[in-house]
Image (cartoon, rainbow, N blue to C red):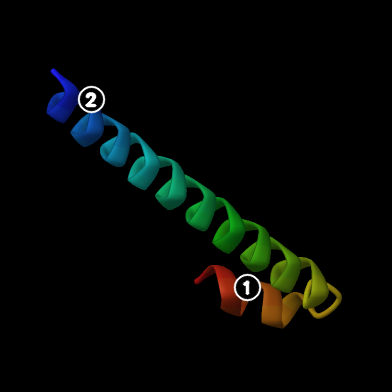
Amino acid sequence: VKNETVVSFSLASSVVSNYLFSLFFLFFFLEKLFFYSENSETKFRVFF
């Protein structure tokens, strides 16, 4: 039982760290997008 708890805890912590990393990456991408949003040509280049 103790070993299963350790495995599930490490799995949960890896899921949480992946979620935080993707959240940080999304925030970074949105910040870049808003920084370049003055130039509509650059904005469309980011999207497509």
Report x, y in % for residue 1.
13, 17
Q: Residue at x 81, y 80 (%)?
A: 39
Mark 1, Cα crowd under 10 Å, few <14 / some 14-19 / many 20+, is: few
The disc, 2 or 1, on the residue closer to the chain's N-terminal end is 2
Callout 2 environment at 10 Å: few (<14), some (14 to 19), or many (20+)? few
- In the depicted view, which residue is nearer to us: 45 or 28? 28
Question: Which residue is identified by label 2?
Answer: 5
- Residue at figure coordinates x 69%, y 82% from the top left: 42
Amino acid bearing label 1: Phe
Q: Position of residue 28 (x, y in %)?
A: 66, 66
**In the shown orientation, is residue 43 left or right of residue 6?**
right
Answer with the quarter of the image where residue 46 lies.
Answer: bottom right
**Who is closer to the viewer here, 2 or 9?**
2
The part of the image, by quadrant, that contains residue 27 is bottom right
Q: Label 2: state its secondary structure.
A: helix
Q: Which residue is mark 1?
A: 44
Q: Residue 14 — which label?
A: none
> Is 10 rendered above or below residue 47?
above
Q: CA distance from mark 2 to mark 1?
A: 47 Å
Q: Position of residue 37 (x, y in %)?
A: 79, 71
Q: Is residue 13 left or right of residue 1?
A: right
> x, y percentage for residue 4?
15, 26
* 2 or 1: mark nearer the eye: 2
